[in-house]
Amino acid sequence: MSNPSEVLATVPLFSMVSKRDLEKLVREIHDRAFPAGTVLTEEDEHGTIFTVIAEGRATVTVRGKVARVLEPGDFFGEMGLIDRAPRSATVTADTDVRCLMLTQPVFRPFALSHPETMWALLELMVQRVRDAESRESDAL
């Protein structure tokens, strides 16, 4: 079983954060396990939880189409932390998964006090928009 600090250190959003600050963040994490087949989050539902896959694999679908597969170190839910809008995708556990979960009241102050995390989040958002545009143009 992976140590939550080690898992977070592999996530691009947290890769530049000091070990000490990661340890503080880990104290606020909810470490949860879900069986294969569990819908971890559903498109159009409201949610303000950021989730990192620590173990296992999950599939992201958008309007019923597979968008990507998540493996350890991958994450989802970052958009809901920012705008609190309904979820843009469904995430379903393909295998048993272990997830590290952060709520918006924990993530927001952490990100605001760590500009390197905010910058990484901006880079991620740009990539997600580009990926969505690419999927949209492929569908035409």
Image (cartoon, helix red, strand yellow):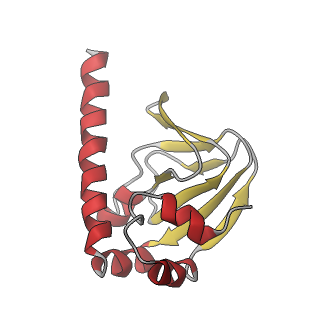
- Identified at 64% across, 42% down, the residue is 57
Residue 83 sits in quarter: bottom left
Q: Is residue 74 above or below residue 138?
A: below
- Identified at 51% across, 43% down, the residue is 90
- Identified at 46% across, 53% down, the residue is 76
Q: Is residue 32 above or below residue 138?
A: below
Q: Is residue 137 above or below residue 122?
A: above
Using residue 62 as the reference point, say whether residue 2 is left or right of it. Answer: right
Residue 28's x, y, as percent?
55, 81
Residue positioned most to the top: 140
Number of numbered labels in the structure image: 0
Residue 49's x, y, as percent?
48, 65
- Identified at 24% across, 36% down, the residue is 130
Using residue 24 as the reference point, say whether residue 13 is left or right of it. Answer: left
Q: Nearer the viewer, residue 139 or 25?
A: 25
Residue 103's x, y, as percent?
48, 72
The quarter of the picture where the C terminus appears is top left
Residue 67's x, y, as percent?
45, 32
The quarter of the picture where the N terminus appears is bottom right
